[in-house]
Amino acid sequence: MDLIVVPTLGPFEEREAYLEDKTVQSTVNTRIAHRHFRNHWYRSSPKDFLELQELVSIAWPSISLEKPVLNIGQKPQLSMMFIENRIPREIYWSGFGFQIWLQMMTQMINAPSESLLVMDEPDIYLHPDLQRKLVRVVTGKFAQYFIATHSTEIINEVPIGNVASVSKGAQRAHKVGNDEGYRKLLFYIGSSENAEFSRIARAKRIIFFEGKDKKIYQCFAKKLAIKSVFDEADTLFLQSGGFSQWSRVKNVNWTLDKVFNIDVSIVAIFDRDYLCDAEIAKFAEKMSEENLLCEVLDRKEIENYALVDSVLIRLLQERAQSSGKSISADEANQVLSDLIEDFRQEVYSKRFSAYELFERNNKT
Protein backbone atom coordinates (compact mmCIF):
# COMPACT_ATOMS: atom_id res chain seq x y z
CA MET A 1 0.00 0.00 0.00
CA ASP A 2 1.35 3.44 -0.97
CA LEU A 3 1.37 6.24 1.59
CA ILE A 4 0.30 9.56 0.06
CA VAL A 5 1.06 12.58 2.24
CA VAL A 6 -0.27 15.82 0.76
CA PRO A 7 2.69 18.23 0.95
CA THR A 8 2.71 21.85 2.05
CA LEU A 9 0.64 23.84 -0.42
CA GLY A 10 1.32 27.34 -1.65
CA PRO A 11 0.44 29.96 -4.28
CA PHE A 12 1.37 29.45 -7.90
CA GLU A 13 4.35 31.23 -9.44
CA GLU A 14 3.48 34.23 -11.58
CA ARG A 15 5.94 33.01 -14.20
CA GLU A 16 6.83 29.34 -14.45
CA ALA A 17 9.80 28.36 -16.58
CA TYR A 18 9.78 25.16 -18.61
CA LEU A 19 11.77 22.53 -16.69
CA GLU A 20 13.41 19.24 -17.51
CA ASP A 21 11.36 16.08 -17.05
CA LYS A 22 13.65 14.80 -14.29
CA THR A 23 13.26 18.00 -12.26
CA VAL A 24 9.46 17.96 -12.51
CA GLN A 25 9.19 14.30 -11.59
CA SER A 26 11.37 14.71 -8.51
CA THR A 27 9.21 17.52 -7.06
CA VAL A 28 5.67 16.16 -7.58
CA ASN A 29 5.13 15.24 -3.90
CA THR A 30 7.38 17.82 -2.25
CA ARG A 31 6.84 21.18 -0.58
CA ILE A 32 7.79 23.01 -3.80
CA ALA A 33 5.28 21.12 -5.99
CA HIS A 34 3.14 24.27 -6.31
CA ARG A 35 6.03 26.04 -8.06
CA HIS A 36 6.06 23.42 -10.83
CA PHE A 37 2.29 22.90 -11.16
CA ARG A 38 2.03 23.89 -14.83
CA ASN A 39 5.04 21.75 -15.73
CA HIS A 40 3.41 18.71 -14.19
CA TRP A 41 0.12 19.11 -16.06
CA TYR A 42 1.87 20.02 -19.31
CA ARG A 43 3.22 16.45 -19.27
CA SER A 44 0.01 14.80 -18.06
CA SER A 45 -2.07 12.31 -20.02
CA PRO A 46 -5.42 13.40 -21.53
CA LYS A 47 -7.16 10.94 -19.19
CA ASP A 48 -5.62 12.45 -16.04
CA PHE A 49 -6.33 16.01 -17.16
CA LEU A 50 -9.95 15.13 -17.90
CA GLU A 51 -10.23 13.82 -14.32
CA LEU A 52 -8.79 17.09 -13.02
CA GLN A 53 -11.37 19.05 -15.04
CA GLU A 54 -14.15 16.92 -13.56
CA LEU A 55 -12.87 17.45 -10.02
CA VAL A 56 -12.71 21.20 -10.65
CA SER A 57 -16.32 21.20 -11.85
CA ILE A 58 -17.42 19.61 -8.56
CA ALA A 59 -16.36 22.73 -6.69
CA TRP A 60 -16.68 25.34 -9.46
CA PRO A 61 -19.31 24.30 -12.03
CA SER A 62 -18.90 27.60 -13.90
CA ILE A 63 -15.15 27.17 -14.44
CA SER A 64 -13.52 25.44 -17.41
CA LEU A 65 -9.85 24.55 -16.95
CA GLU A 66 -7.46 24.39 -19.91
CA LYS A 67 -4.28 22.38 -20.31
CA PRO A 68 -0.97 24.33 -19.98
CA VAL A 69 0.67 25.61 -23.14
CA LEU A 70 4.33 26.29 -23.84
CA ASN A 71 5.26 29.83 -24.81
CA ILE A 72 8.46 29.75 -26.85
CA GLY A 73 10.90 32.58 -26.27
CA GLN A 74 14.37 33.31 -25.02
CA LYS A 75 13.31 31.60 -21.79
CA PRO A 76 10.44 29.15 -22.54
CA GLN A 77 7.59 29.53 -20.07
CA LEU A 78 4.31 27.78 -19.39
CA SER A 79 0.88 29.33 -18.97
CA MET A 80 -2.35 27.69 -17.84
CA MET A 81 -5.74 29.31 -18.33
CA PHE A 82 -9.17 28.89 -16.79
CA ILE A 83 -12.38 30.34 -18.16
CA GLU A 84 -15.11 31.64 -15.88
CA ASN A 85 -18.23 33.34 -17.22
CA ARG A 86 -16.53 33.47 -20.64
CA ILE A 87 -13.59 35.43 -19.23
CA PRO A 88 -10.17 33.73 -19.60
CA ARG A 89 -7.59 34.18 -16.84
CA GLU A 90 -4.22 32.70 -15.98
CA ILE A 91 -4.33 30.49 -12.88
CA TYR A 92 -1.91 32.84 -11.10
CA TRP A 93 -4.74 35.40 -10.96
CA SER A 94 -7.23 32.97 -9.42
CA GLY A 95 -8.17 32.96 -5.75
CA PHE A 96 -6.03 31.07 -3.27
CA GLY A 97 -8.84 28.59 -2.55
CA PHE A 98 -9.00 27.63 -6.23
CA GLN A 99 -5.22 27.21 -6.39
CA ILE A 100 -5.23 24.99 -3.31
CA TRP A 101 -8.10 22.87 -4.66
CA LEU A 102 -6.16 22.29 -7.88
CA GLN A 103 -3.12 21.15 -5.92
CA MET A 104 -5.10 18.84 -3.64
CA MET A 105 -6.89 17.25 -6.58
CA THR A 106 -3.54 16.78 -8.33
CA GLN A 107 -2.17 14.81 -5.39
CA MET A 108 -5.27 12.57 -5.39
CA ILE A 109 -5.19 11.93 -9.13
CA ASN A 110 -1.55 10.87 -8.87
CA ALA A 111 -2.35 8.40 -6.06
CA PRO A 112 -3.58 4.81 -6.62
CA SER A 113 -7.04 4.18 -5.11
CA GLU A 114 -5.59 1.57 -2.72
CA SER A 115 -3.27 4.20 -1.21
CA LEU A 116 -3.47 5.58 2.32
CA LEU A 117 -4.04 9.35 2.12
CA VAL A 118 -2.78 11.71 4.83
CA MET A 119 -3.84 15.37 4.95
CA ASP A 120 -2.98 17.95 7.59
CA GLU A 121 -5.44 20.77 8.29
CA PRO A 122 -6.90 21.18 4.77
CA ASP A 123 -9.61 23.41 6.29
CA ILE A 124 -7.22 26.33 6.79
CA TYR A 125 -7.16 26.79 3.01
CA LEU A 126 -10.76 26.09 2.02
CA HIS A 127 -14.21 27.63 2.33
CA PRO A 128 -16.64 25.46 4.38
CA ASP A 129 -18.49 24.36 1.21
CA LEU A 130 -15.21 23.20 -0.30
CA GLN A 131 -14.28 21.36 2.89
CA ARG A 132 -17.41 19.23 2.59
CA LYS A 133 -16.80 18.58 -1.09
CA LEU A 134 -13.20 17.63 -0.34
CA VAL A 135 -14.37 14.94 2.08
CA ARG A 136 -16.71 13.50 -0.55
CA VAL A 137 -13.89 13.35 -3.09
CA VAL A 138 -11.55 11.69 -0.58
CA THR A 139 -14.08 9.11 0.62
CA GLY A 140 -15.05 8.32 -2.96
CA LYS A 141 -11.47 7.63 -4.04
CA PHE A 142 -9.62 6.23 -1.02
CA ALA A 143 -10.49 3.23 1.12
CA GLN A 144 -8.32 4.60 3.95
CA TYR A 145 -7.46 8.17 4.83
CA PHE A 146 -6.32 10.29 7.77
CA ILE A 147 -7.31 13.96 7.96
CA ALA A 148 -6.06 16.08 10.86
CA THR A 149 -8.55 18.91 11.33
CA HIS A 150 -10.42 21.22 13.71
CA SER A 151 -13.17 21.82 11.14
CA THR A 152 -16.73 20.99 12.18
CA GLU A 153 -17.63 20.95 8.47
CA ILE A 154 -15.27 18.03 7.85
CA ILE A 155 -16.21 16.25 11.09
CA ASN A 156 -19.92 16.51 10.28
CA GLU A 157 -19.34 15.01 6.84
CA VAL A 158 -18.05 11.62 8.08
CA PRO A 159 -19.68 8.93 10.27
CA ILE A 160 -19.10 9.35 14.02
CA GLY A 161 -17.23 6.06 14.10
CA ASN A 162 -14.60 7.50 11.75
CA VAL A 163 -13.71 10.37 14.10
CA ALA A 164 -10.91 10.16 16.65
CA SER A 165 -9.91 12.79 19.20
CA VAL A 166 -6.18 13.45 19.57
CA SER A 167 -5.07 15.30 22.69
CA LYS A 168 -1.66 16.78 23.33
CA GLY A 169 0.35 14.54 25.64
CA ALA A 170 -1.90 11.52 25.13
CA GLN A 171 -0.22 8.32 23.99
CA ARG A 172 -3.10 7.29 21.74
CA ALA A 173 -6.13 8.72 20.01
CA HIS A 174 -9.62 8.08 21.39
CA LYS A 175 -12.33 7.08 18.95
CA VAL A 176 -15.59 9.00 19.14
CA GLY A 177 -18.08 6.16 19.37
CA ASN A 178 -21.40 7.83 20.17
CA ASP A 179 -23.37 11.09 20.07
CA GLU A 180 -22.21 12.12 23.54
CA GLY A 181 -18.56 11.81 22.55
CA TYR A 182 -19.37 13.72 19.37
CA ARG A 183 -20.93 16.59 21.33
CA LYS A 184 -17.93 16.76 23.65
CA LEU A 185 -15.60 16.90 20.68
CA LEU A 186 -17.53 19.75 19.05
CA PHE A 187 -17.59 21.61 22.36
CA TYR A 188 -13.81 21.17 22.65
CA ILE A 189 -13.15 22.64 19.21
CA GLY A 190 -15.56 25.49 19.87
CA SER A 191 -18.70 24.58 17.96
CA SER A 192 -21.34 22.69 19.91
CA GLU A 193 -24.12 24.17 17.77
CA ASN A 194 -25.26 22.83 14.42
CA ALA A 195 -22.25 23.68 12.27
CA GLU A 196 -24.35 24.19 9.15
CA PHE A 197 -26.48 26.93 10.69
CA SER A 198 -23.88 29.54 9.71
CA ARG A 199 -24.96 29.06 6.07
CA ILE A 200 -28.53 30.15 6.66
CA ALA A 201 -28.13 33.73 5.42
CA ARG A 202 -27.44 32.56 1.85
CA ALA A 203 -29.58 29.42 1.79
CA LYS A 204 -32.21 29.07 -0.93
CA ARG A 205 -33.71 25.94 0.57
CA ILE A 206 -33.73 24.15 3.91
CA ILE A 207 -34.21 20.42 4.35
CA PHE A 208 -35.15 19.06 7.77
CA PHE A 209 -34.20 15.47 8.63
CA GLU A 210 -34.88 13.49 11.75
CA GLY A 211 -31.77 13.08 13.87
CA LYS A 212 -28.70 11.94 11.93
CA ASP A 213 -30.69 10.76 8.89
CA LYS A 214 -28.82 13.13 6.58
CA LYS A 215 -25.77 10.85 6.64
CA ILE A 216 -27.90 7.85 5.71
CA TYR A 217 -29.42 9.70 2.74
CA GLN A 218 -25.89 10.62 1.67
CA CYS A 219 -24.92 6.95 1.77
CA PHE A 220 -27.86 6.05 -0.47
CA ALA A 221 -26.95 8.86 -2.90
CA LYS A 222 -23.32 7.68 -3.01
CA LYS A 223 -24.35 4.05 -3.54
CA LEU A 224 -26.63 5.05 -6.40
CA ALA A 225 -23.88 7.26 -7.89
CA ILE A 226 -26.24 10.19 -8.39
CA LYS A 227 -25.52 13.90 -8.16
CA SER A 228 -27.52 14.87 -5.13
CA VAL A 229 -28.77 17.97 -3.42
CA PHE A 230 -26.07 17.42 -0.79
CA ASP A 231 -23.54 18.92 -3.21
CA GLU A 232 -25.42 22.22 -3.53
CA ALA A 233 -23.87 25.08 -1.56
CA ASP A 234 -27.17 26.98 -1.20
CA THR A 235 -28.97 24.09 0.55
CA LEU A 236 -29.02 24.04 4.36
CA PHE A 237 -29.64 20.87 6.38
CA LEU A 238 -31.12 21.00 9.89
CA GLN A 239 -32.34 18.43 12.38
CA SER A 240 -35.96 18.06 13.39
CA GLY A 241 -37.36 15.96 16.19
CA GLY A 242 -39.99 13.98 14.32
CA PHE A 243 -43.76 14.46 14.19
CA SER A 244 -43.99 15.66 17.76
CA GLN A 245 -41.61 18.50 16.93
CA TRP A 246 -43.20 19.57 13.66
CA SER A 247 -43.85 23.02 15.15
CA ARG A 248 -40.09 23.55 15.17
CA VAL A 249 -40.12 23.47 11.38
CA LYS A 250 -43.06 25.85 11.33
CA ASN A 251 -41.31 28.26 13.72
CA VAL A 252 -38.13 28.30 11.62
CA ASN A 253 -40.21 29.16 8.56
CA TRP A 254 -41.99 32.00 10.38
CA THR A 255 -38.79 33.37 11.92
CA LEU A 256 -36.87 33.46 8.64
CA ASP A 257 -39.76 35.15 6.84
CA LYS A 258 -40.97 37.63 9.46
CA VAL A 259 -37.84 38.38 11.47
CA PHE A 260 -34.93 38.02 9.05
CA ASN A 261 -36.84 38.61 5.79
CA ILE A 262 -35.16 35.56 4.24
CA ASP A 263 -37.11 33.82 1.50
CA VAL A 264 -36.31 30.11 1.45
CA SER A 265 -38.09 26.92 0.45
CA ILE A 266 -38.49 24.45 3.32
CA VAL A 267 -38.89 20.68 3.05
CA ALA A 268 -39.31 18.35 6.03
CA ILE A 269 -38.76 14.59 5.78
CA PHE A 270 -40.19 12.47 8.58
CA ASP A 271 -40.06 8.79 9.45
CA ARG A 272 -43.40 7.00 9.36
CA ASP A 273 -42.97 5.41 12.79
CA TYR A 274 -46.17 3.48 13.67
CA LEU A 275 -48.63 6.07 12.37
CA CYS A 276 -51.66 5.13 10.28
CA ASP A 277 -52.44 6.50 6.82
CA ALA A 278 -55.18 8.81 8.12
CA GLU A 279 -52.90 10.47 10.66
CA ILE A 280 -50.15 10.97 8.09
CA ALA A 281 -52.63 12.53 5.64
CA LYS A 282 -53.87 14.93 8.30
CA PHE A 283 -50.32 15.81 9.28
CA ALA A 284 -49.34 16.53 5.67
CA GLU A 285 -52.42 18.73 5.27
CA LYS A 286 -51.49 20.70 8.37
CA MET A 287 -47.97 21.27 7.07
CA SER A 288 -49.33 22.32 3.66
CA GLU A 289 -51.47 24.98 5.32
CA GLU A 290 -48.26 26.45 6.71
CA ASN A 291 -46.79 26.56 3.18
CA LEU A 292 -44.36 23.78 4.05
CA LEU A 293 -43.61 20.75 1.90
CA CYS A 294 -43.70 17.56 3.94
CA GLU A 295 -42.64 14.06 2.92
CA VAL A 296 -43.32 11.02 5.10
CA LEU A 297 -41.52 7.76 4.45
CA ASP A 298 -43.51 4.67 3.54
CA ARG A 299 -41.47 2.65 6.04
CA LYS A 300 -40.96 3.16 9.74
CA GLU A 301 -37.37 4.43 9.47
CA ILE A 302 -35.08 5.35 6.60
CA GLU A 303 -32.87 2.41 7.64
CA ASN A 304 -35.71 0.02 6.75
CA TYR A 305 -35.07 0.65 3.05
CA ALA A 306 -31.75 -1.16 3.48
CA LEU A 307 -33.48 -4.33 4.72
CA VAL A 308 -33.33 -6.51 1.62
CA ASP A 309 -33.83 -10.26 2.12
CA SER A 310 -31.18 -11.38 -0.36
CA VAL A 311 -28.56 -9.05 1.13
CA LEU A 312 -29.34 -10.06 4.72
CA ILE A 313 -29.16 -13.76 3.79
CA ARG A 314 -25.77 -13.25 2.18
CA LEU A 315 -24.49 -11.37 5.24
CA LEU A 316 -25.71 -14.12 7.56
CA GLN A 317 -23.86 -16.69 5.48
CA GLU A 318 -20.68 -14.59 5.47
CA ARG A 319 -20.85 -14.05 9.23
CA ALA A 320 -21.35 -17.78 9.82
CA GLN A 321 -18.43 -18.59 7.51
CA SER A 322 -16.13 -16.18 9.38
CA SER A 323 -16.95 -18.15 12.55
CA GLY A 324 -16.02 -21.45 10.90
CA LYS A 325 -19.62 -22.49 10.27
CA SER A 326 -21.71 -22.96 7.17
CA ILE A 327 -25.42 -22.34 6.61
CA SER A 328 -27.46 -22.63 3.44
CA ALA A 329 -29.58 -19.84 1.96
CA ASP A 330 -32.73 -21.64 3.15
CA GLU A 331 -31.37 -21.84 6.70
CA ALA A 332 -30.44 -18.16 6.67
CA ASN A 333 -33.89 -17.30 5.38
CA GLN A 334 -35.42 -19.29 8.23
CA VAL A 335 -33.36 -17.31 10.74
CA LEU A 336 -34.78 -14.08 9.30
CA SER A 337 -38.33 -15.47 9.37
CA ASP A 338 -37.94 -16.45 13.03
CA LEU A 339 -36.69 -12.97 13.92
CA ILE A 340 -39.62 -11.39 12.13
CA GLU A 341 -42.07 -13.59 13.99
CA ASP A 342 -40.45 -12.66 17.32
CA PHE A 343 -41.27 -8.98 16.69
CA ARG A 344 -44.52 -9.32 14.76
CA GLN A 345 -46.84 -9.13 17.78
CA GLU A 346 -44.99 -6.17 19.27
CA VAL A 347 -45.09 -4.21 16.00
CA TYR A 348 -48.79 -4.90 15.43
CA SER A 349 -49.52 -3.83 19.00
CA LYS A 350 -47.71 -0.51 18.56
CA ARG A 351 -49.39 0.18 15.24
CA PHE A 352 -52.81 -0.52 16.73
CA SER A 353 -52.07 1.69 19.75
CA ALA A 354 -51.04 4.56 17.49
CA TYR A 355 -54.20 4.14 15.40
CA GLU A 356 -56.41 4.00 18.50
CA LEU A 357 -54.81 7.14 19.96
CA PHE A 358 -55.29 9.04 16.70
CA GLU A 359 -58.95 8.05 16.41
CA ARG A 360 -59.61 9.01 20.02
CA ASN A 361 -57.93 12.41 19.65
CA ASN A 362 -59.57 13.01 16.28
CA LYS A 363 -63.05 12.66 17.77
CA THR A 364 -62.49 15.15 20.56
Image (cartoon, rainbow, N blue to C red):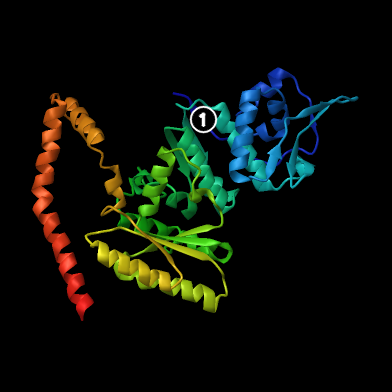
Judged left or right of residue 142, residue 122 is right
Residue 169 seen in render: no
Q: Residue furthest right?
A: 74
**159 w.r.t. 202: above or below:** above
Q: Position of residue 205 (x, y in %)?
A: 52, 61
Instruction: State which quarter of the image contains the N terminus.
Output: top left
Secondary-structure class at tag 1: strand
Number of marks in picture: 1
Q: Residue at x 53, y 27 (%)?
A: 111
Indicate the position of residue 224 as horizontal and vertical percent values: 42, 38
- Which quadrant holds the C terminus? bottom left
Which quadrant of the view contains residue 289?
Answer: bottom left
Q: Is residue 27 visible?
A: yes
Query: Which residue occupies 78% across, 28% down?
Result: 69
Closer-to-camera residue (70/10): 70
| Picture coordinates of residue 189, whole percent (x, y) | 45, 58
Residue 147's spot in the image, x, y percent? Answer: 47, 42
- Identify which residue, 70 or 359, lies in the foreground: 359
Determine which residue is flagged by label 1. Answer: 4
Identify the residue at image location x=48%, y=62%: 206
Relative side of 150 to 165, left or right: right
Asked whether, in this view, residue 351 is left or right of residue 249, the answer is left
Label 1 crowd (10 A; few <14 / some 14-19 / many >=20): some
Q: Amino acid at mark 1?
A: Ile
| Vertical placement of residue 331 versus 223, above or below | above
